[in-house]
Amino acid sequence: MILRINRLRQFGIFTDYNGSAIQQFGRYNLIYGWNGTGKSTLSNVFSCLENRSLIPRFAGAQFSIAQEDGTSLTEANLGASQINIHVFNQRFIHENIDWDKSVKSILLIAKDKIDDLQALEKKKEELGERQKAHTANLTEVRTKTEALEKFLTSTAKKMKTGLQAIDTSDSYYLNYDRRKLSKFIESNGELVAKKESVLSDDKVIELTNSAKPDHLPNITFISIEIEEGYFKKAAGRIRDLIGTTAINQAIERLTENPIIRDWVQKGLEIHEHHKSESCEFCGEPFTKARAEALAAHFSKEFTDFQTRLNNAAIWIESQGAPAHSLPASISFYKEFAAEATKLEERYKEAAQKINEQIEGWRDVLKAKITDPSKTDIQILDMGEDDVTNFNAVLSSIVDLVKKHNNKTDNFSAETSKAKRSLELHFAAAEIQEFDYAGNEKLCKDLDATATTDKKTIDGLALEVGKLEALLSNETVGAKEFNDILHRFIGRSELCLSFNQVKKGYEIIRNGVGEHDGNLSEGEKTAIAFVYFITKLKENGNNIKDTIVVVDDPVSSFDSNHLFHAYSFLKTQCIDAKQLFVLTHNFTYFKLVRDWFTTTNRNRAKKTPPKPPVAFFYRLDAPPGSPRHSLLVDADESLKNYGSEYHYIFKKLFAYRVKTTLDRDEAFLTANLARKLLESFFTFKFPRGRNDVNQLMDAGLEGCTVTTPELKEKIYRFINKYSHSDVIEITEESAENLAGESHSVLNNIFQWIEEVDKKHFDEMVEVAQGA
């Protein structure tokens, strides 16, 4: 069953209706609404459900209708609906009956073919089960698809926010949306599924920095590496030098005192240069023995060896790790800065290790120079790993500079590459957590199943249609229709006769002649309503499985037909799965209301008591611009009063006691006041009154309190604000209406009281007691 109309948007007068606040629909539902409140539009909502498509004039409408099984019917899934609903309204009449030509066929099953129905029923049962399963499958497809769409939308939004924070000038990421993410996934399906595509936090930070739009200049750096084997050769030469001695006759004191030795050696060079025969320091002459001893000590070989040692000492002072001016870390792009700092530290450590070993070599040479005769001095070889490490650090610095310069030279391409890597990371992280691939495959599998099921269902439907065509008979339909129509209108001169050429029924009067389209409005309405009820049984349709909607089957009936229509509706539709009756005729409303009320009352008397199954509603179209309509719960006065006159009197009397009326109440007052006066004066003065003005003139006779001027004021008020031919809706007229309505309302009740005080007093008692 249909439980509630949750939403109606852009559906004619239902501009934005929300029905979540009213009571749920029951098995029997009665809706009362005056003309213009949206009654026909509401019946067309049900027609859309019957046709499984939106009526063209409501092509842009949206709706949501809750069903008993927990699902909702919307404009999106309407085509797949399996709801069994039949609607009687003006649209039904227009689509089925051409009063000037023919009436569409009704296919009923002949009694002699009832046994053949079993095969048809089995097929229909199978068809129904498959359709139900298909609908459930489509619902699951829609749910899964919506989940995928929601995931793409939310993920794209998060990615947009994250990528925008990196670079707000990139229009691609500035306008990142579900469509772009979907395209990215489609183009990188294998990559987004790989675990390796989800990066570490450090890598994300690096790429984020790399994607920044800060363009830096190139860095110049010249690397001087240590030649392979360089220090090995140097160590060999130093080792040879310190292991060598010069032949001399050593003077012990000079040997033990290098300072004195150097002083004396320098002095000898001076004396030889000046050819001095005596000591230039003390003036004493050299002895021959002393001169020979000093000459032996400072022999030429020894002097040359000392020169070699001194030269080696000078050379080694320039040795060590090659000095470099490293580029500052702040000159690199931010993603390289941390690496530049690390390499700078590694460079210092590698250079220090080499320089410390060179310092040891210096100390060895100093010791040899101090005592050239020593031959037991040792030096260590330079660590090859230290040299290799030093050169590797330099190579890493060169590579980092190349990366920096490459980004500078190809800035746009490199930043884009970083952004694409980040896009892949973000997408992969979300997709793998959500299992997008699995959900997408499930959707495709479900959709494929639905397509296959649809083909099976279409085939079954075709078989059912063929069986129905074999079993159904237009003549049987015409016979049943004619029998019901004759009982309904109480005479038998109108009949339906099947025309094989037209493939439809002709309306024949008195059993002779051709199609008779010259029918009274009462006859047309009777034929249409009986036709609808008869058609409910078409093709073996079971009323117990059918939702029936009836919109005003009594618009042109006289009182006799009105009661026929009520009893006909009750006897034919009481077993319907669900029944909706819409009417503007209060007498018909009252008849159906009393039937429904009795049903609820009888259920309440059961042991244990059963809940009500019949509910009452009212259509309301509050004034305003644009006009809109609401379906609301019927108020107690509408459910309890015995006539429309009672209801209107009570409504207006409630407005009368209010100090002021708002604009909506004021607009309603004009319409209700006209109906109240027209009903009152028609009853009081039934003879020869053709319009409201004449009735009001008759009511003025004998009155003293109500003057012709007051009568004219009341007439102009109800005529101006309630008649579609003259109504004026402007801001000024709306303000006048709100200002005048309360005063005119008091004049109307004063007039009714003056014409018939006893009637007025009793009506007040009824109104106040309700």
Image (cartoon, helix red, strand yellow):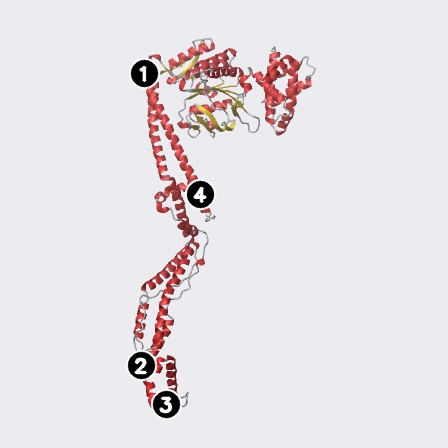
Q: CA distance from mark 2 to mark 1?
A: 138 Å
Which residue has dot 4 on it?
158
In front: mark 4 or mark 2? Answer: 2
Q: Which residue is mark 3?
A: 286
Question: In which quarter of the view is residue 449 placed?
Answer: top left
Mark 3 burial class by Cα count in 10 Å: few <14, some 14-19, many 20+: few
Name the residue type under label 1. Asp
- Residue type, mark 2 in image: Glu
Report, in whole angstroms, how far the alpha carbon at label 4 lies from the one at label 2.
86 Å
> Contact (CB < 8 A) between labels 4 and 2?
no
Q: Which residue is mark 1?
A: 116
Q: What residue does disc 2 label?
A: 301
Crowding around mark 4 (Cα neighbors within 10 Å: few <14, some 14 to 19, many 20+) is some
Where is residue 107 shown, x and y percent of the image? 38, 17
Quarter of the image with the C terminus is top right
Q: CA distance from mark 2 to mark 3?
A: 24 Å
